[in-house]
Amino acid sequence: MNLIDTNGVSYIFDRQISLTEDYYLVPDVIEEVELAQLVHSQSIPVGISEIVVIDEFDEVLYLNHYKRMLNIHGGRSFFNMTGFGDISILATIHTVLDMFTIQKIERLFDPTEQIVVFTDDSRLTRRVNTEFTGKNVEVKPVTDIK
């Protein structure tokens, strides 16, 4: 599963990339991408969807993880409304990992797949690597977007 942040969407806009893989936007990043769309005068390319449309996303779990991530990680500004995309990505990863566990129990097979976050944000990279050490989660630079 590929998650993408605003940097990744801007990278796609700047280079007019035709995507060959599917990418997902998390809730708070969707709002940031709407601004990027205005700046670039482009719509979101085919291949990028909102994470809320997939079975592995549960909004109740997400909101619980979001609240927990808000209390654990700093670097946000309610005044400037910055840093919430990072929190949303971390909460989404926790949500998807939880849903993989639930599906594994219910379906008697392991649906787990690797979660890849595409970003050039060093703070987000550090947070993901720290938060998900030993999990099937990886961070890649936006230049790896296909």
Image (cartoon, rainbow, N blue to C red):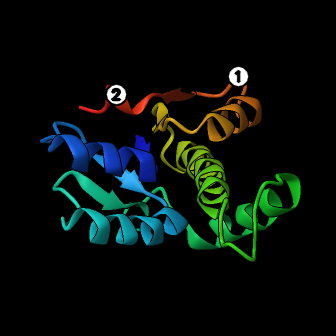
Image position of 24 with respect to 42: above or below: above
| Residue at x 23%, y 50% (from the top left corner) | 13
Query: In this image, 137 relative to 83: left or right?
Result: left
On screen, residue 121 versus residue 129, left or right, reads left
Question: In the rendering, at what x and y percent does residue 144 appear?
Answer: 33, 26
Q: Amino acid at mark 1?
A: Gly
Residue tagged by mark 1? 134
Lateral position of residue 145 relative to residue 137, left or right: left
As measured in the structure, the alpha-carbon distance from the residue carrying label 1 to the one carrying label 2 is 24 Å
Question: Tag 1, which secondary structure?
Answer: loop
Residue 73: mark: none
Give me the residue at 67% from left, 59% from top: 83
Q: Secondary structure at mark 2?
A: helix
* Tally of numbered tags: 2
Q: Which quadrant of the figure contains the N terminus?
A: top left
Q: Give the x, y percent position of residue 73.
A: 82, 52
Q: Is residue 109 in sight in this rendering?
A: no
Q: What residue did someone put label 2 on?
A: 143
Looking at the image, can residue 83 be seen? yes
User: Which amino acid, mark 2?
Assistant: Thr
